[in-house]
Every structure is written in C-alpha cells, then in structure tokens.
Image (spheres, rainbow, N blue to C red):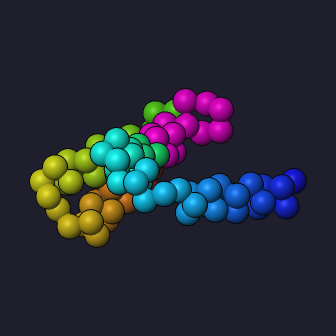
C-alpha cells in the first residue's frame, strides 16, 4: 500500500510539472492555487480545534483559537499570537476547563 501511495504521489507531482505554462497562467488556476492552501489550513485548524477522534468537543482550544484570532485582528506578531493562544489554553486547563 505504501509503494502504491508513493507511486501515486509521484505521478501526481509529475502530472503537475508536465502541464503547459499556458494552463498555469490562467486567472482561475492562479486564484485556485492561492486559495487552496488557505482553505486546507483553515479546515485543518477547525478539525484539530473541535474534534477529539470522532467526537465534537468544546474545550480550552476554542478559547485559545478565539484569543489567537483577536491577536491576529490586532496585527500582533506571529510569535505573540502563538504564545497568547498557548497561555490561554494552559491557563484554562490549569483551572479545570478543558
């Protein structure tokens, strides 16, 4: 299974590299290429924030995400955003929430 997956990934990468430049320069393809990583990252954050296996949970991670979003809205440095979110989650877990 691992070899089949590796071959599939290689074939997909090769297919992308084999596309003519005219296809890659289309406005729709450019917009999709810019939006897709953002959408995938947002989905990953959402799933990791509210899921615990197959269960939906609401715990300290939600508050940490809210603090991080507020810090980003205030244009805080990335390191500050991460530290604030971590401190929020740790503080809430220390007092028994989450």
Image quarter for residue 72?
A: bottom left
Q: Position of residue 12 (x, y in %)?
A: 65, 55
Q: Which residue lies at the image location 16% right of the left edge and 49% below the top edge?
A: 73
| Extreme residue in the left direction | 74
Which stretch is magenta? 43-56
Q: Which residue lies at the image location 76% right of the left edge and 61% below the top edge?
A: 6
Asked if residue 47 is among those painted magenta in the image, a careful observer would answer yes
The answer, for residue 73, to whether it is visible in the render is yes
Q: Say if 5 sits above or below 65 in the image.
A: below
The answer, for residue 96, to whether it is visible in the render is no
Q: Nearer the viewer, residue 88 or 78?
A: 78
Q: Position of residue 95 (x, y in %)?
A: 40, 48
Asked if residue 37 is among those painted magenta in the image, a careful observer would answer no
Give the number of callouts.
0
Q: Position of residue 26 (x, y in %)?
A: 34, 47
Q: Nearer the viewer, residue 82 or 29?
A: 29
Q: Is residue 48 found left or right of 13 in the rendered image?
A: left
Q: Which residue lies at the image location 74% right of the left edge and 54% below the top edge?
A: 8
Q: Nearer the viewer, residue 12 or 95?
A: 12
Q: Is residue 66 found left or right of 77 in the rendered image?
A: right
Q: Nearer the viewer, residue 65 or 37?
A: 37
Q: Say if 83 sits above or below 73 in the image.
A: below
| Extreme residue in the top direction | 56
Q: Which residue lies at the image location 31% right of the left edge and 65% below the top edge?
A: 83
């Amino acid at each position: 299974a691992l070899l089949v997956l590796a071959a599939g990934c290689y074939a997909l990468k090769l297919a992308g590299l084999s596309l003519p430049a005219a296809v890659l320069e289309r406005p729709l393809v450019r917009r999709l290429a810019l939006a897709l990583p953002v959408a995938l990252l947002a989905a990953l954050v959402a799933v990791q924030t509210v899921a615990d296996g197959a269960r939906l949970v609401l715990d300290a991670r939600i508050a940490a995400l809210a603090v991080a979003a507020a810090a980003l809205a205030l244009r805080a440095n990335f390191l500050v955003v991460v530290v604030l979110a971590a401190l929020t989650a740790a503080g809430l877990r220390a007092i028994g929430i989450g």
